[in-house]
């Protein structure tokens, strides 16, 4: 039985795994990402040796890599990687070829997570799918007619930097009021602090979006308002996505996405106000089924598919 390997290279962690042709995980692991480039190469080499041992008598026939940052598919370079700057402008193929002596492919990590959701998310693969990963930041990927949509230079699917609040706070991308600055984990905490009275704040310690979610479930007013505010802006973005792309499915993942109906229910209601009703009704908005493994799963599946193409 043949296997495919997938790598999800993040700024802090490298997640990796071996998959069979149905997408079943045979082996998985993760390691810290060395920031020095040479050490990064050595680490990949070590992981690869480990994977080959795990594969045993089964042959690994293709490898897929997900990298953080803007990926240019034509040149196979990362144009800009805020979370792993050592990758910027590096010709990835010659670098990886020194370690991996078999067919391999690469893409942006969020694009590959979307590919994984598209491939494994239902009995029948949808014609089109948009993934939004709501966490520390907002990642996204677009699948159109079964292919990752990159745009002309690789900048497509930066939905996290769609303007939803022109008067909002400044984003690290240089814009103001991006979807990311309004619905990320940090945004939920910021909204919560804005809605709480000083007396309330003295009583409670809220450090993370998870804390806000717990309070909201207990009926805390400021926490509920915080989710409603994030949902309002998420709904605006969902409405824009529906009118713009008319996708069959929109998938919401990530740590903040996992808060479920607390966010998704009001976001759906809001989205309905911002797009054509027939398009809204036809769009399935669901939670992600793949968790933290989405990146390497998508990378391995993409490699499978490219190999057999
Ligand atoms: Zn931005």
Image (spheres, rainbow, N blue to C red):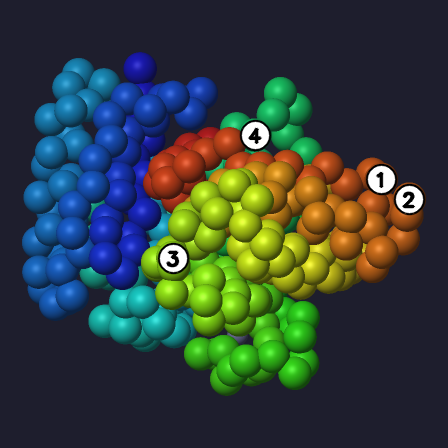
Choose the circle earlier in sequence order: 1 or 4: 4
Q: Which numbered disc flags the more N-terminal residue, 3 or 1? A: 3
Q: Mark 2 touching mark 1, by CB under 8 A? A: yes
Residue beneath label 3, please? 204
- Residue tagged by mark 1? 281
What is the CA distance from the residue labelled 3 to the residue labelled 1?
41 Å
| Residue drawn at 11 percent across, 47 percent down | 45
Secondary structure of the residue carrying tag 2 is helix
Q: Position of residue 189 (x, y in %)?
A: 46, 62
Distance, label 2 to label 1, CA atoms, is 5 Å
Q: Is residue 3 left or right of residue 197?
A: left
Rendered residue at 33%/24% (across/down) = 25
State the residue position of label 4: 121
Q: Pick whichever of labels 4 and 2 is earlier in the sequence.
A: 4
Dot 4 crowding, Cα within 10 Å, few <14, some 14–19, many 20+: some
Q: Nearer the viewer, residue 292 or 185?
A: 185
Mark 3: is the Cβ under 8 angstroms from ligand 1? no
Crowding near the residue tagged with mark 2, few <14, some 14–19, many ≥20 C-alpha atoms within 10 Å: few
Q: Position of residue 12 (x, y in %)?
A: 23, 57
Asked which quadrant contains residue 22, the reply is: top left
| Mark 2, residue position | 278
* Mark 4 CB within 8 Å of ligand 1: no
3D distance between C-alphas at marks 3 and 4: 39 Å
Q: CA distance from mark 4 to mark 2?
A: 23 Å
Q: Secondary structure at mark 3?
A: loop
Question: Residue at the spot x=42%, y=65% of the render?
Answer: 201
Of the image marks 3 and 4, the number of the one nearer the N terminus:
4
Q: Nearer the viewer, mark 3 or mark 4?
A: 3
Which quadrant, please, contains the N terminus? top left
Residue 8 visible in the picture:
yes
């Amino acid at each position: 039985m043949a296997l495919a390997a997938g790598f999800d290279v993040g700024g802090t962690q490298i997640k990796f795994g071996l998959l069979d042709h149905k997408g079943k995980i045979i082996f998985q692991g993760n390691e810290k990402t060395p920031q020095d480039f040479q050490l990064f190469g050595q680490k990949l080499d070590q992981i690869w040796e480990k994977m080959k041992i795990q594969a045993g008598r089964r042959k690994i026939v293709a490898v897929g890599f997900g990298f953080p940052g803007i990926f240019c598919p034509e040149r196979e370079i990362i144009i800009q990687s805020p979370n792993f700057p050592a990758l910027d402008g590096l010709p990835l193929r010659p670098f990886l070829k020194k370690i991996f002596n078999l067919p391999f492919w690469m893409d942006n990590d969020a694009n590959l997570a979307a590919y994984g959701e598209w491939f494994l998310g239902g009995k029948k693969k949808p014609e089109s799918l948009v993934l939004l990963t709501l966490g520390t930041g907002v990642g996204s990927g677009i699948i159109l007619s079964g292919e990752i949509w990159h745009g002309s230079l690789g900048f497509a699917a930066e939905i996290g930097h769609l303007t939803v609040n022109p008067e909002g706070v400044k984003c690290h991308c240089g814009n103001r009021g991006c979807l990311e600055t309004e619905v990320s984990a940090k945004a939920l905490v910021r909204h919560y602090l804005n809605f709480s009275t000083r007396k309330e704040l003295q009583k409670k310690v809220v450090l993370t979006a998870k804390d806000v979610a717990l309070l909201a479930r207990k009926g805390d007013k400021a926490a509920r308002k915080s989710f409603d505010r994030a949902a309002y802006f998420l709904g605006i973005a969902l409405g824009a996505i529906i009118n713009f792309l008319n996708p069959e499915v929109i998938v919401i993942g990530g740590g903040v996405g996992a808060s479920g109906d607390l966010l998704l229910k009001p976001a759906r209601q809001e989205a309905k106000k911002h797009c054509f009703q027939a398009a809204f009704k036809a769009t399935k908005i669901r939670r992600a089924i793949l968790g933290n493994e989405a990146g390497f799963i998508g990378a391995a599946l993409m490699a499978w598919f490219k190999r057999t193409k």
